[in-house]
Image (cartoon, rainbow, N blue to C red):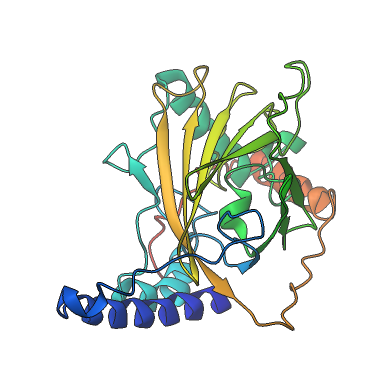
Amino acid sequence: MQKKIWRKINRFAAISVIALLGAMPVELFAQQAWEPPRTVDGHPDLQGYWDGGPVNASHSIEDGCCDVIHARMQSRTADRLGLLEPLIIDPPDGRIPYQEWAEVKRTQLLYDMETPTELGHIDPEDRCLLLGAPRSNYRGDLEIRQTKDYIVILYEWAHAYRVIPMDGRSHVAETISMYNGDSRGRWEGDTLVVEAKNFNDQVWLDSHGSFYSDKLRVVERWELIDSDAIRYEATIEDPNVFTRPWTLAFTMGRIGGDDYEFFEEACWEGVTNKHRLAAGRLAVAAGERQLHTHEEESQ
């Protein structure tokens, strides 16, 4: 997590320089409009290693990190520099537009995950499950590989990957559901547009119980805005759970050089389940059931 903080700081410094340059006369740049690097088939070249979304987004896409200690340690510097950008850009209040019953269920999930007594109470990330879209894109680093017919995204988390056909083929049958869903891509000008559907209902959007149903549909937009930055946007809809479609967005920064390699995040399902369930059952038996939150008072 600390490595992501420093990447954000470095990116902030670069943005500051760009802002200063932007104050210079337009005429100086009139002949130097930025053109993205392109592959042999003429589309922007998105290939390379990229960091994920804002620091701590995977914990709560509405509120950020976490318990007070983590927030103080990981986010203080980023907050001073204005790097904790809001993730949800629509609705304007930055909240997920859950239906009333679904908001009640999410609150119940926050109780259950604090003192889990069955497998489904544990955050899917802590169970080492595949995290789907869009969560995989703000969980950690990723690598994009690109050909005319496919976009492949490799994730540092749990050796996960997505293979995205670009040839116009149909989605798989609606009766098929998967953790990472089924993705299909196309180019709209210089923007890569990916439609993902056929998800199962076993994964959350963050570690705060932000669940969805198997009717989830995500439309992602990947745009190279300079040689070292991708603007990522995802519009999310699920008529079974949300009152309306909603959108999150953030900027990914390029990382690493020619010799860069992923850190290994070796994680397999079941590695922590037994002790989590044992602790949860003991807490419930002792009457210590409580809501999972990151609003605890500091010590």
Quarter holding residue 122: top right
Q: Is residue 168 above or below residue 49?
A: above
Left/right of residue 134 with respect to residue 293 in the rendered view: right
Position of residue 286 in the picture relative to residue 192 (left or right) = right
Q: Is residue 118 visible?
A: no
x then y, percent, for residue 72 = 41, 73
Residue farthest toward the front in the current orientation of the protein: 31
The picture places residue 14, in percent across and down from the top left corner, at 37, 81
Looking at the rendered image, the quarter that the C terminus falls into is bottom left
* Depth check, front residue: 131 or 207: 131
x, y (%) of residue 284?
Answer: 65, 40
Is residue 68 visible in the rendered structure shown here?
Answer: yes
286 sits to left or right of 20:
right
Q: Residue at x 29, y 74 (%)?
A: 31
On-image quarter of the N terminus: bottom right
The relative height of residue 79 versus residue 6 in the rendered view (above or below) is above
* Count of marks, rendered view: 0
Residue at 54% x, 67% y is 37
127 relative position to 106: left or right: right
Residue shown at the point (65%, 64%) measured from the top left: 47
Locate residue 214: give its quadrant: top right
At 71% across and 25% down in the image, what residue appears?
Answer: 171
The picture places residue 157, in percent across and down from the top left corner, at: 72, 59
Query: Taking 29 as reference, is 229 above or below it?
Result: above
- When the figure is inspected, residue 176 is found, relative to residue 70, above or below; the finding is above
